[in-house]
Amino acid sequence: MTISIFPDPFEQARTTDGVSTIDDQNDPVTMVMGLKDVRKCAHNWKSFQSGGEEVGRIVVPSEAAIRDVRQIPFEVDPPEHGGFRKLVEPWFKRPLEADYQEKLKVIIDELVEEAIKQPKIEVVEEFALKLQSRALTLLLNTPFEESEVWIGWGTHVFRSKDTDLDGDKANLLYDYIDKEIEKAIANPNDNFYSVLLASEVNGKKLTKEEIKGVISLTFAGGRDTVINAVTNTIAYFSEHPESLQRLHDEPEITTKAVEELVRYFSPLTHMGRVVTEDTAVCEHAVKADSRISLCWASANRDAKAFENPDEVVLDRKLNPHVGFGFSTHNCLGATHARQILAILIGSLSSKLSSIDAFENEENIEDWQQFQRKVGFHSLNVAFNAK
């Protein structure tokens, strides 16, 4: 099998026109493909806006029809964005602390050891979803038991296997957040809800709606992306046991390996922006109030920036990937995600001799002329202990 090969469906469009257009719910989107252009557009928040009037429209596919809660600071532009970012960024940097990493290591080691005892395990639901949910209890500083509730939601909080836009799931999340905010109001503690309730931005207390927006982003932004990253990493090692052994022998390259796996697999295909004025992208005109998307997955395979872009080079030295976004709205949860992958690699390489892969169902995103493998709906493997 070649389950760890993720083809690049954007190569031709990237090398010829630099852009392509897809339709999203009768709302056309101009996809920006090359690394240089993606970074340039991401940096230009004045022309390509995240905080437009219509909440959810910058996501592709648009979530405007299923939510009216603005995700903060994701859907807020400067100068307001800076105040929110300054507030929450220290909280999201906590994964750099030794105590946080040790707790995360316990969670990951326990999951790996449980998997070793089983003759076969389905990675997406039984490993990656559990890992993501249990690790999130650390990020929110909430009881470990809450992860069981989140596991029950499945791999995406706004989508289900049958539909890309599931309003019922969105309401389930928002009802849950409302209840948790009320609990924190009644009994303040040291969790993320209580910290936000006690905080100010630009001299004003956060409203319940703003707190809901921050928490919503925390749940939604790092869910399927982390699940994809974990699952795809395991798929890669199942076909490259020599890489697993190399990372055991050379742990000093783990940081580079994490960046390379994120670059190659690009857990999030793209993210949109709303155009604020008539302008041009790659010499193609785009109209005000239309949408572009920053295609991270395409940019991360740009041969102008990456040597041998379609290969995983674990110790890649120059790696300006945009797997966690770029510029003003780069991913808040990147530090947490990096630590998950680094600790997972350490656990797998120290405990396993190999991983056997069995039946799987690929998760193929349908972007009309582009069919992109983003991960798996299911992947069955056996973890072989050393």
Image (cartoon, grey):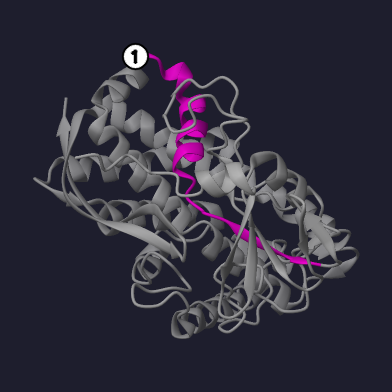
Q: Is residue 193 found left or right of 138 in the rendered image?
A: right
Where is 93 relative to 124, above or below?
above
Q: Residue, x 26% and y 51% (percent of image)?
A: 123
Picture coordinates of residue 174, whole percent (x, y)? 55, 80
Q: Residues within 10 Å of mark 1 (few under 14, many from 20)?
A: few
Picture coordinates of residue 304, whole percent (x, y)? 62, 30
Work out which residue is located at the far top of the displayed protein and give it.
249
User: On the image, which quarter does residue 217 sit in?
Assistant: bottom right
Start-end of magenta stretch: 249-275
User: On the image, which quarter does residue 202 sit in?
Assistant: bottom right
Where is 248 relative to 228, above or below?
above
Picture coordinates of residue 75, whole percent (x, y)? 72, 66
Q: Disc 1 marks which residue?
A: 249
Rendered-image quadrant of the C terminus: top left
Q: Residue, x 34% and y 72% (percent of image)?
A: 161
Work out which residue is located at the far left of the displayed protein and give it.
119
Q: Residue, x 86% and y 67% (percent of image)?
A: 277
Q: Which of 125/310 is in front?
A: 310
Where disc 1 sits, the SS reads: helix
Q: Amino acid at mark 1?
A: Asp
In the rendered image, residue 324 lying in the magenta stretch gets the answer: no
In the rendered image, residue 273 lying in the magenta stretch gets the answer: yes
Residue 190: in sight, yes or no?
no
Work out which residue is located at the far front of the displayed protein and give it.
16
